[in-house]
Image: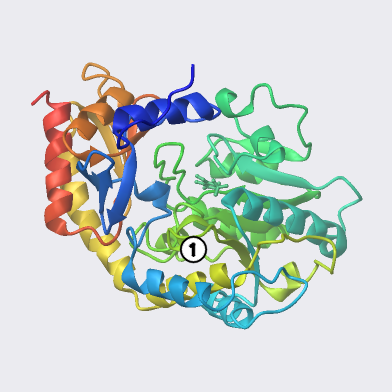
Amino acid sequence: MTTTVTAAPTTATEFARAEERTAHNYHPLPVVLAEAEGAWMTDVDGRRFLDLLAGYSALNFGHSHPALIEAAHEQLDKMTLTSRAFVHDQFADFCAELGDLCGKDLVLPMNTGAEAVETAIKVARKWGYEVKGVPADQAKIIVASGNFHGRTTTIVGFSDDPVARDGFGPFTPGFVTVPYGDLAALEAAIDANTVAVLVEPIQGEGGVVIPPEGYLRGIREACTRENVLFAADEIQSGLGRTGRTFACDHEDVVPDIYILGKALGGGIVPVSAIVADRDILGVLKPGQHGSTFGGNPLACAVGRKVVGMLATGEFQRRGEELGVLMRERLEAMVGHGVLAVRVRGLWAGVDIDPAVGTGRQVCEALMARGVLVKDTHGSTIRLAPPLVVSAEDLGWGLDQLAAVVTGG
Ligand SMILES: Cc1ncc(COP(=O)(O)O)c(C=O)c1O
């Protein structure tokens, strides 16, 4: 059956049309959004929602941040795409400014997070063969249980989530999984052919899982000792989300490779990158890696503005300060419909008591109260409000969560 639009679109008609004509690779909440500004979104029926998900941290600066929109408009009017066959006038500045933010020499821009992870894997392997001297095709990369690094066949091949993985093999060899947070297991897994350790400093999709204090420092030390690259996937944890520029900053750790995405595109365009020193990224030669859209003028113009905004420290400060408020409110919910919370900066995993309902049911109840969030792994709600949210709005959103989990 085909649904046709005969009147103004409504949530019911648009949701049904979307369900009818798209692959069902997502299970969205039944809301159809039309406009957004700051921390607020409006649906096609004119209802307003407080966004406490922020596009899984892709909208750290909120919706339609005026400075980002201005940068995008300005670039749209000038030039949008050149391909990397030519150099454009935003490219050098983007690479230099992002490299400086990370304290690294070189930047390799891509588009999506998964592409940046793939890029880090390729670079680590090539570095292993050409610099470390690993025998051909023997490179090993250590990853962590519960990881989420994207959706390509190589990446889902080292996921331990059957939903992400099953039915998509055969998979790329060369990955070894150790329990997340277990430094001894990670150290024991390193051998002469290990080229990299690839981890999320905090596992976002896993439910905002924060490793034990000292874990990242321990990885840094082990990688330095064993001549192995530490590749930190900061795609979700980075760029202000945890109250610092990078989640690794909480342990004063500098990885060899930063993998960035999501908020780097300002919520406007997909922009990802890996950032590393010359002795690592310098292994790539022309023709060995690339992307038609990677580092395009629009992406670089928006990315430069994002980097400039982060360089002020304002957003990191907001993340830290609002995070204190969020932590206090969430910790008070433990034992009252909430089993446990994990908070770092303005980012939280909230484990819902099954007696209250599933994570999905809580999200639907919150939606009815004007708050948008999303569940992960059945019973966990991930909160990642835009860093521009006001304390008052955040407090109101958390009031709604408290009311839902206590059956109010
Ligand atoms: C830590 C991490 N890495 C990689 C990705 C993949 O990014 P993308 O969806 O842009 O490919 C995600 C997405 O959620 C992520 O959270």
- Residue placed most toward the observer, 255 or 119: 119
Relative to 241, residue 374 above or below: above
- Residue placed most toward the observer, 13 or 66: 13
When asked about the image quadrant of residue 278, the answer is bottom right
Q: Which residue is drawn at 44% across and 45% down?
A: 211
Q: Where is residue 360 in the image (x, y as percent from the top left)?
A: 32, 25
Relative to 92, residue 81 above or below: above
Residue that protrudes farthest toward the left in the picture:
408
Relative to 75, residue 45 above or below: above
Residue that protrudes farthest toward the front in the picture:
6
- Residue placed most toward the observer, 267 or 216: 267
Q: Where is residue 51 in the image (x, y as percent from the top left)?
A: 27, 47
Q: Residue at x 74, y 26 (%)?
A: 169
Q: Residue at x 53, y 30 (%)?
A: 22
What kind of element bears circle 1?
helix
Relative to 56, residue 356 above or below: above
Query: Is any atom of residue 377 visible in this view?
Result: no
Q: Position of residue 175 (x, y in %)?
A: 72, 39
Mark 1 CB near ligand 1 (8 Å cut): no
Side of 279 relative to 367 (left or right): right
- Residue on which disc 1 sits: 264
Q: Where is residue 129 in the image (x, y as percent from the top left)?
A: 86, 57
Instruction: Report the number of numbered marks.
Output: 1
- Name the amino acid type tagged 1: Leu
